[in-house]
Amino acid sequence: MKIVLIEDEPLAAKRLEGMIRAIEPKVTVLARLDSVRESVLWCNQNEAPDLIFMDVQLADGLCFEIFQETEIRSPIIFTTAYDEYALRAFKVNSIDYLLKPIDPDELRDAIVKFNAQRAPQNQEQVRPNLDQLLRTMAPPSYKNRFLLKTGTRFEVVETRDILYFYAEDKVVFIQTAANQRYLIEDTLDELEKKMDPQAFFRANRRYLTHLSAIERIEPHFNGKLALRLKYRPWEEEIFVSRDKADGFKKWLDS
């Protein structure tokens, strides 16, 4: 088995190599690389190894930059100290992950998994899995602007200028900080998926509101919260239900 070690800590690389040799005595280490730049150069100039052990945080950046600069045909076993969300992503999309400090039994299990997937019929799955990994770890993309038709012309409304979206008589509107109202074709359910959840909160079935739109918050009967939003009538009652109240408070405090 021919492998490459991509690890920016020499002692960690030496220890990992020793552990691998204890499991696979005939392993050949083709290269020991410690940076994104060095890894890209090596991959561009050499044939793909059977397996790559890759640390996530390298000397000059994150290992994901390697995939953006060159084509990686080899399966990957990641070594990482990332949080639980990242670990789950690695578990689904790569051969395996190894949480530092590396446990010998987990390393053995990862190599067994690699050997099981090494059959020819499984080789074509390697690149799709890596592509899926990159998509999973990429930061989510949210809506930045809306192109809206007003009468006979179109207008562009920037997301940063929106106070809230609200439904009225089965129609959805945008309310802007400049006190302008626009009709929009999207439903609130669709908009909730498009907007940054750090900035917008689905208060109830009728309102998806930005933090800057909230003028006042008051406790209400049965654990509800009553909101006062800019440019809405004072007599209109806008409630966050008891079920959503805790999530709303955490959102405000995030």
Image (cartoon, rainbow, N blue to C red):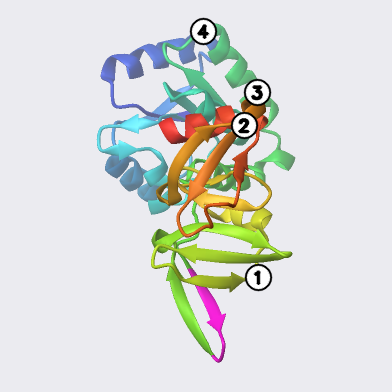
Q: Nearer the viewer, mark 4 or mark 2?
A: 2
Tag 4 and tag 3, C-beta contact below 8 Å: no
Tag 4 and tag 1, C-beta contact below 8 Å: no
Question: Which disc, if any, is residue 113?
Answer: 3
* First in residue order: circle 1 vs circle 3: 3
Q: Residue at x 44, y 25 (%)?
A: 82
Q: Seen from this angle, which residue lies furthest front? A: 235
For the residues marked 3 and 2, what is the alpha-carbon distance in whole angstroms?
A: 51 Å
Magenta part of the protein: which range? 146-152
Crowd rating for badge 1 (residues with CA inside 10 Å; few <14, some 14–19, many 20+):
few
Up/down of 81 relative to 225, above or below: above
* First in residue order: circle 3 vs circle 2: 3
Q: Quadrant of residue 203?
A: top right
Q: Seen from this angle, which residue lies furthest bottom? A: 152
Secondary element under disc 2, as helix, strand or loop, is: loop
Up/down of 216 relative to 160, above or below: above
Judging by the rendered image, the residue that carries numbered circle 1 is 185
Judging by the rendered image, the residue that carries numbered circle 4 is 104
Q: Residue at x 66, y 42 (%)?
A: 123
Q: Nearer the viewer, mark 1 or mark 2?
A: 2
* First in residue order: circle 4 vs circle 3: 4
